[in-house]
Image (spheres, grey):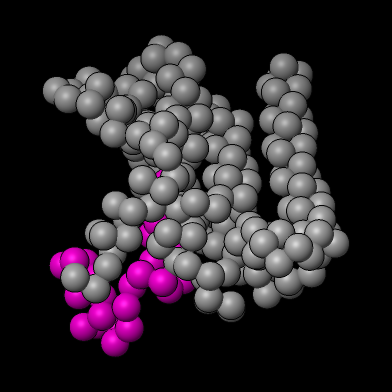
Amino acid sequence: MDWSALRLSLELSFWTMLVLLPIGIWLGRRLAWSQFRGKSMAEALLALPLVLPPTVLGFYLLVALGSRSPIGQAYEALFDQQLSFSFAGLLIASIVFNLPFAIQPMQRAFEAIPQEVREAARCCGMPSWRILLRIELPLAWPGILSAMVLTFAHTLGEFGVVLMVGGSIPGETRTIAIAIYDRVQAFDDSAAASMSAVLLLISLFAISLSYMATARLGKGRHNV
């Protein structure tokens, strides 16, 4: 069992989920209620990682974050290390390819909130930030929770983009999915099976927790 790879995967999943939480809330809310020119194109771009082959997305991210790109050069000048094939580059790539998994469930959750509820809150004199905290977020919480669980689980098992952008550097970019692939290539079926079982159990636990929390929230609202 490669515990270092598992720890790295859990850390990458956690930080990706944490970064995408405010981004998903802001973009999901805006896409749900705002009408603007180019909205369909914006939604299509955000959904692109769902249909692009991971190697294609990984290639473009590698080019965008590489040492010859402005982003890569700026990062290297600031931190004296390259962005590609590092945990920081892996995190940026993870945020990009998880955008649809974070934004789309939140967008649907905000769309399900009746417009009359928000208008009534405005008529009562509530400021926008208070409407968000006291009304919108509690009502949209099941969708937000689902988005975070999907993001966590998808990051945990991602292979193609991670391999393209991060490679397989032990302790730095070698995730559990890559470790499983390496063990299979080395004909170490026992190690691959144990790591796959751990990954399966963690993903199943995360998804089950999401369903349980969503069901409890729905039951609490029904009782109210």
Nearer to the camera, 199 or 124 = 199
Let me know if residue 16 appears in the view. Answer: yes
Image point (45%, 53%), residue name: 161
| Prevailing secondary structure class for the magenta stretch in the rendered image | helix
Image point (76%, 63%), residue name: 187
Image point (35%, 34%), residue name: 48
Q: How many marks?
A: 0
The image quadrant where one finds the N terminus is bottom right
Seen in the picture, residue 47 relative to 174 is either above or below; the reply is above
| Whole-percent x, y for residue 15 in the image | 52, 61
| Whole-percent x, y for residue 158 in the image | 56, 50
The image quadrant where one finds the C terminus is top right
Let me know if residue 22 appears in the view. Answer: no
Nearer to the camera, 43 or 58 = 58
220 relative position to 102: left or right: right
In reply to whether residue 71 is colored magenta, the answer given is yes
Residue 209, located in which quarter of the rendered image? top right
61 relative position to 162: left or right: left
In reply to whether residue 128 is colored magenta, the answer given is no
Give the magenta-colored segment's residue range.
69-97
Seen in the picture, residue 211 relative to 164 is either above or below; the reply is above
Nearer to the camera, 81 or 67 = 67
Seen in the picture, residue 100 relative to 12 is either above or below; the reply is above
| Whole-percent x, y for residue 160 in the image | 49, 51
Nearer to the camera, 12 or 131 = 12
| Whole-percent x, y for residue 141 in the image | 57, 34
